[in-house]
Amino acid sequence: MTRTFVSSPTREVIIGFDQPFVIIGERINPTGRKALAAEMKAGDFSRVESDAVAQVEAGAQMLDVNAGIPLADEPAILAKTVQLVQGLVDVPLSIDSSIVDALEAGLAVYQGKALVNSVTGEDEQMERVLPLVAKHGAAVVAITNDETGISENPDVRFEVARKIVNRAADHGIPKEDIVVDPLVMPIGAMGTAGRQVFRLLGRLRDELGVNSTCGASNVSFGLPNRQGINAAFLNMAMASGLTSAITNPLETEIRHAIMAGDVLTGNDAHANRWIALHRDPNAPEGGRARGRRRRAAVGEG
Amino acid sequence: MTRTFVSSPTREVIIGFDQPFVIIGERINPTGRKALAAEMKAGDFSRVESDAVAQVEAGAQMLDVNAGIPLADEPAILAKTVQLVQGLVDVPLSIDSSIVDALEAGLAVYQGKALVNSVTGEDEQMERVLPLVAKHGAAVVAITNDETGISENPDVRFEVARKIVNRAADHGIPKEDIVVDPLVMPIGAMGTAGRQVFRLLGRLRDELGVNSTCGASNVSFGLPNRQGINAAFLNMAMASGLTSAITNPLETEIRHAIMAGDVLTGNDAHANRWIALHRDPNAPEGGRARGRRRRAAVGEG
């Protein structure tokens, strides 16, 4: 059974088919958040801090950290954000950038085993990102597009995933450290987007035996009641093999759908977490920020 | 693409992988409803009537009708209930009994093409029920247990389904008229119950090419917030291949999860129904009872 380990200095999280689904908090990302982008560029990280703490307390087992701000020094800002977030919460991070220099700057300051987000199936990109992942002993998100773009055929995307897994092996990176992103398109624009992803996730689980993640909120773009679509999508994707997602844990409907999904995959043993949630609905569902957390032993995640 | 047609005198419903998910209303069933059982036995069908109308108005495309009352004349009561419900609403019915004489009595008065619920993989039962299904040109729910009971191994249940499909063919019943019930156990009692069903549904779709249904509410037996578990289960089962379910359309969370699922399978084209639901949340989601319905043409379903 494939297990992907990631860690902070004090906490280990396992992504796997026999594990509770891993929520990677999506909020620390200036893309589409103008106020946050302006603040981060100006050196004001107060919103990053509150987003970090709120997401972990809501149940995020990991946080994605992105500093993609136009005309800014992304490597420097990403490194600073990583350090700041690691000083505040004890969950492992996904270091998120399309710029390799930024990934490198983030990895240089990261403490623990990070998830690098991401590498594509493009040769040049693989040859730059994979050595970095190998050097730092990190795990990496593999995005299923290559030089030809994003195929609408899930079997073509599967071959891209396989290519990345094979290339990673050449760099000494085991498939346990590859988390494949099947690429989720807006269902409102492409009615086959859901079926494509469900089929691809099944093949990734059954044939390639790799973990997976995705930016789940994208699927509902342009539709009313996005939470309702996102929650249904996550449950359908979990049944198909998805083992983690970059999503918003502050949205109750999404968080609870994932918890119900864990009951149904058998990864919430005896439905203990589900029962506890309903016994005391005011209890915090996730971990605590540093200084307020109850336990900090490795293995808590 | 396998399509199962069922009908009332004025309405046809299609169960299929390329169709919106079919909700079969579960409420007209005295099992576990003492008041309803006593009323039906005494000839008082007022609750049957209100349940029929309410479920159709809430969005049920079919209704399950069961008259399993201890020490009562089940064939007579089932036939009377079928006639009464058909006089009231125009959706096709699932005629539900474990007593073959009751199925026969229900079929004798049914107008249209019914769904017979059910036949198991037991030889004696198949040899009694399948000729009845063939004689009336009905469709039938095939339950995946046989003389040896219900296997916890989904691959054994798959072979039971295959056996029923083959035996039905001997009676001239095409596989399009077989709707397989994978048998859903309470997840609280058996942590593998979900995975079993998801795997079996995938094989039923991909290898046997048959439609499926299940008593979905059973999965959450004994757990808190049963609607939350049921909704997640239905979405996960839809992704795995489930094309209909016997469930409660009066529960909003379940109904909306199914509608979101239809968006994600691509069976709510352009998300039209989902968008309409959120444009006017007070609009009736389902059909109308007889005399109040807007359209009655065959093919409306």
Image (spheres, coloured by chain):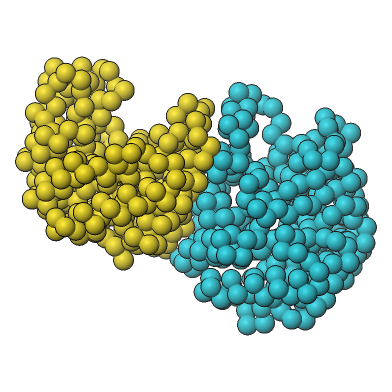
Chain colours: A yellow, B cyan
Q: Is residue A161 left or right of residue A238?
A: left
Q: Is residue A160 left or right of residue A39?
A: right
- Location of residue A67 (image quadrant): top left
Nearer to me, B173 or A34: B173
Residue B24 is situated, as x and y percent measured from the top left of the image, at 71, 50
Q: How many marks?
A: 0
For image coordinates 89% across by 67% down, the residue present is B135
For image coordinates 56% across by 51% down, the residue present is B238
- Location of residue A48 (image quadrant): top left
Nearer to me, B296 or A104: A104
For image coordinates 26% across by 60% down, the residue present is A3
Could you tell me which quadrant the C terminus of chain B lies in? top right
Residue B97 is situated, as x and y percent measured from the top left of the image, at 79, 66
For image coordinates 90% across by 59% down, the residue present is B79
Residue A238 is situated, as x and y percent measured from the top left of the image, at 43, 52
Nearer to me, B43 or A45: A45
Residue A7 is situated, as x and y percent measured from the top left of the image, at 17, 51
